[in-house]
Image: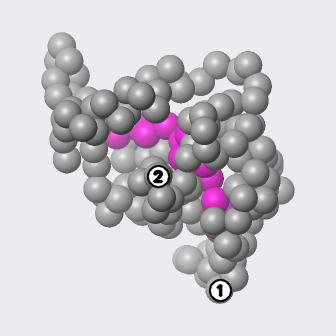
Amino acid sequence: MASKVVGSEKIRHVMSCSSLTGDSVVNSKGEDLGTVEDIMIHIDSGRIAYAVLSFGGFLGMGDKLFAIPWEALTLDEDNHQFILDVDKERLESAPGFDKDNWPDMADPQFGKEIFGFYGFEQPSWGSERGVRSSSRSTSQSSRLTDTEGEDCIERGTC
């Protein structure tokens, strides 16, 4: 994992998917929303497309899976969890799928539906990175723009 120290705080810019899968997901109220089951990569752009959230059921049985736009999640590294700013009741009505019936994640209509549900205009691998459709403030300001992201990848500094 690549990191740098800013003041006394260590900031990680690169983490392995295996260190993030299995992390819990909570909402801003601290309610348990499930765990990160998998992380999907958009091969053409090399960007993370979705985190697959496992929610509901009991002991892994009957869980419903949800494709969560990566931009909708905020990593709380200290507590090994993600924060998803959505009420538990809203998540229950989100478009989901079961472990034996995965949707075509590359289908543009599926991406549009998922990103729209969580308040984004389009997927992050589109022409603009995950533009939020509402003016609601999030921690998005800490995310890199396309140009900044490409520059730091070339330099190996992100």
Residue plotted at (71% across, 38% down): 120
Query: Does residue 36 appear in the picture of this structure?
Result: no
Q: Position of residue 91 (x, y in %)?
A: 74, 52
Q: Position of residue 7 (x, y in %)?
A: 18, 13
Q: What is the magenta segment's predominant secondary structure? A: strand
Magenta-span inclusion, residue 89: no
Q: How far apart are labels 2 and 1 at the CA level? A: 27 Å
Residue plotted at (63% across, 65% down): 106
Q: Nearer the viewer, mark 2 or mark 1?
A: 2
Q: Cβ–Cβ below 8 Å for labels 2 and 1? A: no
Quickly name the residue at label 1. 100
Image quadrant where residue 103 sits: bottom right
Farthest residue to the bottom: give it: 100
Residue plotted at (59% across, 24% down): 138
Q: Which kind of residue does numbered mark 2 sit on?
A: Ser
SS label for mark 2: loop
Q: Which kind of residue does numbered mark 1 sit on?
A: Asp
Q: Position of residue 51 (x, y in %)?
A: 53, 57
Q: Give the mark nearer the N terminus: 2 vs 1.
A: 2
Q: Position of residue 78 (x, y in %)?
A: 32, 38
Magenta residues, as a range?
Answer: 64-78
**Residue 45, disc:** 2
Residue plotted at (69% across, 82% down): 101
Q: Is residue 152 left or right of residue 67?
A: left
Mark 2 neighbour density, 10 Å: few (under 14) some (14–19) many (20 or more): few
Q: Is residue 57 left or right of residue 8?
A: right
Farthest residue to the right: give it: 93
Mark 1 neighbour density, 10 Å: few (under 14) some (14–19) many (20 or more): few
Which residue occupies the foreground of this view, 36 or 30?
A: 36
The answer to whether residue 101 is above or below residue 31 is below
Image quadrant where residue 65 sits: bottom right
Which residue occupies the foreground of this view, 128 or 3?
A: 128
